[in-house]
Amino acid sequence: MVTVESTAAERPAAGRGRVAAGGWRGRLAYAGRLVVLVAGLFCFACGIVLTLHSGLGLGPWDVFHQGLARHLGWTFGTTSIAVGFGVLLLAWALGMRVGVATVLNMTLVGAFIDLINATGLVPSFAGRAWPVRLAVDLAGVAVVGIGSAFYIKANLGAGPRDGLMLELARRAGGRVALARGALEVSVLAIGLLLGGTVGLGTVVFAFGIGPAVGLAFRLFRVTGDE
């Protein structure tokens, strides 16, 4: 996935995940940030389901999740959680600090995806005309952008996939773009070999997620100081 995590994780994570001083006001503020975080993760999951049900192709991490799920016989969401756990262990071994957002990102996005699929909240558009499927796919990318903005606004830390990206970038001399590109190309290639769906939607996600997140930042007034 975009990693829901993406973009925000490229900022330093120092000080995230700690309850601000100030007694009940600090705890209330922290609870509010948790609500924003969970809302962002739910939006992110909704966006992923829309891209999944468009049948046009997925983002790099979700191509990997889908391909692996087909081989393991697991649900998409369960596979996402399992991959997130494996990535978390690797990132932790490389020096990543695990916070509340890391754990919630790993578990809730996958759980929400399975919940949305189980309830039939989003129907499949695979048999529809391609303009309809493209519109659904674009809507999915936009919703992922909104979810990312809320997730970042909560400012409670990076998810496991972006944590791994940051640790790889640190070991590559701070080259975040290089680490992110290498990581996403790798999981995309493996996902394709496993039978994940690659197509127009993959291109839309690759080129559309950045502008979608940027627009959501402006709409919800998310800044680098969140």
Image (tube, rainbow, N blue to C red):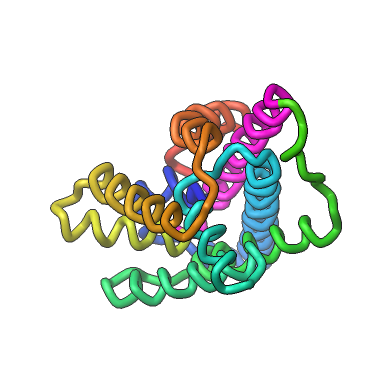
Is residue 139 shown left or right of residue 100?
Answer: right
Is residue 95 shown left or right of residue 128?
Answer: left
Q: Nearer the viewer, residue 93 or 12?
A: 93
The residue shown at (53%, 73%) is: 82
The residue shown at (27%, 50%) is: 182
The residue shown at (48%, 50%) is: 3
Image position, residue 124 (x, y; %): 77, 44
Q: Relative to 61, say whether 101 is above or below.
A: below
Q: Relative to 73, say whether 144 is above or below.
A: above
Residue range of the region highlighted in magenta in the rendering: 130-158
Is residue 69 shown left or right of residue 113?
Answer: left
Residue found at the very far top of the displayed protein: 131
Q: Nearer the viewer, residue 87 or 75?
A: 75
Image position, residue 199 (x, y; %): 51, 37
Residue 6 visible, this orientation: yes
Image position, residue 208 (x, y; %): 50, 29
Image position, residue 161 (x, y; %): 42, 60
Q: Nearer the viewer, residue 57 or 166?
A: 57
Residue found at the very far left of the displayed protein: 173
The residue shown at (69%, 31%) is: 133
Residue 21 visible, this orientation: no
Magenta region, mostly helix, strand or loop? helix
